[in-house]
Image: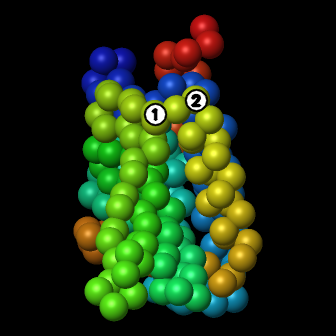
Amino acid sequence: MSKESEKLDLLGFFAEDHHFIKELAKAVRDLIGRPATTPEQIHHLAKLLFALERLPRRTPRLCIELTLGQRHANNESDHLRLTLDDTRFCLGKDRYIIIDPSVGGDSAGETIFEVEGQSRELVGPTALMDWVEAFCGRVVDSENELEISDADGSEFDWEAGRADADWDDLKSDYA
């Protein structure tokens, strides 16, 4: 594979994003170890962990969305969302707010960080760090609901190589 075609296989992360990806991979390992995590969730979390450890390299045929949510006594809720597929990595927040108990509420979502192809978007300078910190905090609290959807469902190549060296070649805001 040529150097140019190898670059096309990489998502548009910056070198400094590697730290956050490693933190997320550690958090996914912790989710796997939660006593309430089901065997099916462990399977999907293992696929997500595999793909996180391959970043910035794409994982073909992957399409996983994970949410960690908090439900409040008044039926409001907020969720942190991680989406990873073969073209996109996205971190977001979703909320359900009761406007009027007799009528119901409204949902709102926000994308905090997104890499799609070679495009990278970040809401603000501390938004990514704040999101990852909140996510890691929710992992240790088993009261937070874990939901995972795996839209693909088929097998992918578990033997595909890891990509630690790829992070060294990425552009950086600090270089």
Name the side, left or right, on which 142 lies relative to 47. Answer: right
The three-letter amino acid code for the residue at tag 1 is Leu
Secondary structure state at the residue bearing disc 2: loop
Q: Which secondary structure lies at badge 1?
A: strand
Q: Residue at position x 61%, y 79% from top?
A: 144
**Dot 1, crowdedness within 10 Å: few (<14), some or many (≥20)?**
some
**Residue 105 in sight from this viewpoint:** yes
Q: Which residue is mark 1?
A: 122
Instruction: Measure the C-alpha gap from mark 2 to mark 1.
Output: 7 Å
Q: Is residue 64 above or below residue 56?
A: below
Residue under pointer 2: 125
What color scheme is it? rainbow
Residue 25 horizontal/vertical position (percent):
61, 55
Badge 2 vs badge 1, beta-carbon distance below 8 Å: yes
Q: Residue at x 51, y 26 (%)?
A: 14
Rendered position, 173 above or below 84? above
Residue 15: x and y in percent read 57, 25
Q: Which mark is residue 134?
A: none
Where is the C terminus found, in terms of image quarters?
top right
